[in-house]
Amino acid sequence: MGAKYELRGDVAVITLDNPPVNGLGYDTRRETSAGIDRAMDDAAVRAVVITGGGRAFSGGADIREFGTPKALGEPNLHSLIRQIENAPKPVVAAINGTCMGGGLELALATHYRLAAMGVDIALPEVNLGLLPGAGGTQRLPRTVGVETALNMIVSGKPVKSDVLGALPGQQLLARLTGDDVVEAAVQFARERAAEHAGGKPLPLVRDLVATHPNAEAYFQFARNMVKGMAKNLPAPPRCVDAVEASVARSFEEGLAYERRIFLGLMVTPESKALRHAFFAERAAGKIADVPDDTPRRRIDSVAVVGAGTMGGGIAMSFLDAGIPVTILETKPEALERGVATMRKNYEAQVRKDKLKQDKCDARMALLKTTLAYEDIAGADLVIEAVFEDMDVKESVFRKLDAVMKPGAILASNTSTLDVDRIAAFTRRPQDVLGTHFFSPANVMKLLEVVRGKATAKDVLATVMALAKKIRKTAVVSGVCDGFIGNRMLEQYGRQAGFLLDEGGTPQQIDKAIEKFGFAMGPFRMFDLAGNDIGWAIRKRRYVEYPDMRYSKTFDLVCEAGRFGQKTGAGWYDYQPGKRDAIASPLVEDLIAGQRQALGITARRIGDDEIVHRLVYALVNEAAKILAEGIAGKASDIDMVYLTGYGFPLFRGGPMCYADTQGLFNVVQTMKRFARNPLDDEAFWQPAPLLARLAAEGKTFNP
Ligand code: NAD
């Protein structure tokens, strides 16, 4: 594995060979470099073609090498690029498939490039808080023009080869081809060899000039645009600086400048966090005691029990992936209502031009409805999404156990109930697990896969693979009250209540955490989710955990019938049909009354304190979750918060954030909070795992 070398007559073909995307890892670089040398040394070879094996040309740097000495091993990407540029015989890139990042930078070093139609071309480094660091910011503007290059580099988004090939005056692609790009490139290389045989110099991208008729004004405009869009991210404005250098400086100076910026960005906390999130997403699919080669069950059809808010969204997730769904209800009216909501959601997507009408029709055509369990008996997977009530779950699972074919997977979408108890209602607990979707289920990325005591490994492996197919980020959670996400959220919510009692307002608290980067503050989120849901959970917890303290204001708001957006009033007031949160004088009175009852004089709480009390509340509970083995690794907890709870991506999740702050400092801050007589001393006792890691100078994420 690395790169293959073959001769097609007098043309050498080097095929990058590092599945799945021909990442430019050490072996691939070394063998490509050796192939170039061999071709230059062989008098019978007149030109070289570089292409990719499989479906990609190259996806760029080999992410598996990140941070290891191999990443720097010679030839590194810079050396290889230089070697290609300096080759005395024509080198032609045959871009057969996806060409990204370092892969595109390598192609830009060749003398000519041919691409198949419809191939994705991108410089996506900005998504990791970086910029292309091997000449991409200097060479791409010289080939496709400054504006196209800047758009590609700042957005990281792929552009199709035919779009780039059609740009007036572009020098990126010498030719667009059909699927026979390698054969076309071999022929093309032969012609170029003849053309250059007489000593005519080979064309180099570095010798082209990047210009803009109104460079100064354009870059100023770009800078303003980027600043507005990338509020907390350092990389996008630096991309503008680097591309500007392609116009304003010599090639070599521009290259050195790009390098300096790249190295500076590498050490920013934002880039570290984005890279952490990138790896955490991939790691979430790995379960320590479930090997990758665990056999999987076939899932060709799915049944959903309950066509309510969640059932409808879950069904849509499968329909979107082309998997047929049968949805079961108790009454025809409930079925009709559920299906009508799904259709309405699809039609809204069509109206917004996010979905074509024929696709919408195809998806609805995959949906069947029924009132009879016999009709779903043959499904490979059934997901229950009925009322959150153990008796109702029991009756559903007993019926499923009676009718479902052997080997079918039985899943519950419960948010709070004990999956082991649910499994025990059946004679096949090994086939039962939780699939905790988030609302709206067809939109939200997160899926907590709840592993019961008896859940079989192949069931777990099957559901994790299926999650990928329906484009969810699946994270495994053990069985506990609230699983990973909601168990942590409980402490976050309690702390938000204490902040209110001490002097905060919903607006101030929401604003502080939104400035930190959260998609939504706690009170806006409670209003969106429905305050009645938390109320029901609290009523149960008051009995189960009589010592646990909550701000009474939560109940006062519910007692006033203020359940949130759905009732037009919650922590905020809402105007009919609008979602803007308006400060509520009534809620302010409730908060003030509660303070008076507690004998508290309101104080002004700083944004920093608000953010740290809320985020460290998450972190401390997460440390317990990790120690108990409910989460398999810290990065799984980060993924839950990044994909399900609006935690800012550029902070990498709560565990990554705590690591960045230093766990010693986190513990010190918690000790300070514990000394606040109005806060809850027990709340701020550092979890044993956190205390130990802090004492040992370690981090949650390795
Ligand atoms: P919902 O009230 O909107 O829908 C429940 C549906 O189940 C109703 O249409 C009802 O007619 C149907 N139903 C009730 N008993 C049934 C039975 N015996 N057989 C068939 N259908 C039956 O509730 P929801 O919000 O969709 O929640 C469903 C489940 O998902 C609950 O366990 C809930 O805790 C969980 N959940 C909800 C959310 C959320 O944000 N709403 C998020 C995650 C998980």
Image (tube, helix red, strand yellow):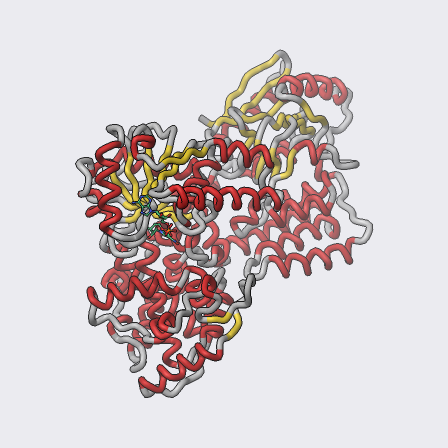
Q: Is residue 75 left or right of residue 678?
A: right
- Looking at the image, which residue is at 30% across and 59% down? 487
247 lies above or below 110? below
- Looking at the image, which residue is at 53% across and 72% down? 582
Q: Is residue 659 left or right of residue 407?
A: right
Q: Is residue 699 left or right of residue 565?
A: left
Residue 89, by quadrant, is top right
Which quarter of the figure is the N terminus placed in? top left
- Looking at the image, which residue is at 30% across and 74% down? 671
Which residue occupies the foreground of this view, 659 or 675?
675
The answer to whether residue 67 of the structure is visible from this angle is: no
674 lies above or below 410? below
Q: How many marks?
A: 0
Residue 622, by quadrant, is bottom left
646 lies above or below 22? below
Q: Position of residue 23 (x, y in %)?
A: 50, 34
